[in-house]
Image (spheres, grey):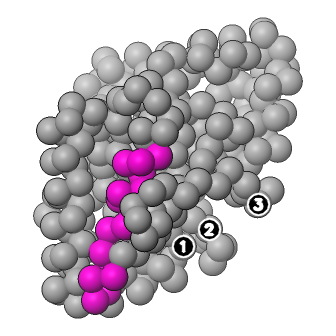
């Protein structure tokens, strides 16, 4: 079963992240690299991406003439996806265990961030939705 | 430049979607499939995934002992990722144009959904922290 582990944060959290010391950032990055390596070594890794900063984000809708209409204004409460991992595991529990690992990624001063990780099943195809 | 196009919806929106007729769903999927094909033909397609419904979603945090703590209760306002496309395009404008096309996919009665599509740049390996 494929699952996606998503890390999201509000704009305020991103702003705070931008003020982390170099040491804190390096510790966090090293953890994330080790986590990805662990997933690869155990054969469950499928894909992973990190996203650019929210200030570059745009919401796009189609106008009546089919031209894209973009908007870059978001509520403070909006959660922006920061990055994700897709893993192929035997059970939801195994996916949740991996999510808990990454939730413990170190924050400032090396303390576990305890960031919430959203765990969702990835569809093999549209038919999996059961509509 | 790689961009990710995120399609999101609230739980209420997803429930509405479940009530679509088979004809409406088929028409919607046909357009999305033709967009995928087009992106394959232009060489801009990188990846795409659909996610299972929000009712299966869990938020996971790590506890001190490393055990996952799961929570499946979300505010009504929460936006759930429904699916995404990753495209490799020459400019942000091209990414917005593709998002606009996705936004025009037909909904009930063939009327375009005008769904908002969030467009985000993928972080290059050297730009992950933005520093």
In the image, what residue occupies the spot 51% across and 46% down? A119
Question: For the residue carrying disc 2, how many other residues have a C-alpha within 10 Å: few (<14), some (14-19), or many (20+)?
Answer: some
Q: Nearer the viewer, residue A20 or A28?
A: A28
Q: Nearer the viewer, residue B101 or A118?
A: A118
Q: CA distance from mark 1 to mark 3?
A: 15 Å
Q: CA distance from mark 2 to mark 1?
A: 6 Å
* Circles 2 and 1 in contact, beta carbons < 8 Å: yes
Q: Chain of mark 1?
A: A
Q: Nearer the viewer, residue A107 or B21?
A: A107
Q: Chain of mark 3?
A: B
Which quarter of the figure has residue A72?
bottom right
Judge depth for marks 2 and 3 and give the one in front. Answer: 3
Residue that protrudes farthest toward the front in the picture: B65
From the image, tell me which residue sits under label 3: B75
| Of callouts 2 and 1, the N-terminal one | 1
x, y percentage for residue B2? 28, 47
Residue A101's place in the image compared with B22, above or below, is below
From the image, tell me which residue sits under label 2: A78
Q: Disc number at residue A10?
A: 1
Residue B30's place in the image compared with A115, above or below, is above
In the image, what residue occupies the spot 19% across and 76% down? A27
Secondary element at tag 1: strand
């Amino acid at each position: 079963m494929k699952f996606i582990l998503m890390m999201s944060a509000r704009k305020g959290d991103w702003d705070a992240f931008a003020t982390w010391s170099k040491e804190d950032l390096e510790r966090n990055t090293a953890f994330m690299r080790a986590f990805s390596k662990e997933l690869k070594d155990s054969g469950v890794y499928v894909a992973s991406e990190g996203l650019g900063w929210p200030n570059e984000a745009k919401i796009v809708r189609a106008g009546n003439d089919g031209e894209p209409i973009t908007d870059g204004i978001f509520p403070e409460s909006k959660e922006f996806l920061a990055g994700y991992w897709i893993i192929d595991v035997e059970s939801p529990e195994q996916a949740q265990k991996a999510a808990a690992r990454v939730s413990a990624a170190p924050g400032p001063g090396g303390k576990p961030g305890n960031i919430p990780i959203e765990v969702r099943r990835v569809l093999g195809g549209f038919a999996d939705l059961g509509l | 430049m790689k961009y990710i196009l995120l399609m999101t919806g609230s739980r209420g929106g997803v429930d509405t979607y479940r009530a679509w007729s088979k004809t409406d769903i088929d028409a919607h999927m046909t357009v999305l499939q033709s967009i995928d094909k087009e992106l394959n033909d232009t060489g801009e397609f990188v990846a795409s995934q659909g996610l299972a419904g929000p009712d299966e979603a869990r938020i996971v945090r790590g506890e001190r002992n490393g055990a996952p703590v799961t929570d499946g209760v979300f505010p009504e306002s929460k936006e759930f990722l429904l699916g995404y496309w990753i495209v490799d395009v020459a400019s942000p404008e091209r990414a917005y144009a593709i998002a606009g096309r996705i936004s025009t996919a037909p909904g009930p009665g063939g009327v375009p959904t005008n769904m908002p599509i969030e467009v985000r740049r993928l972080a290059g390996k050297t730009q992950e922290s933005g520093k």
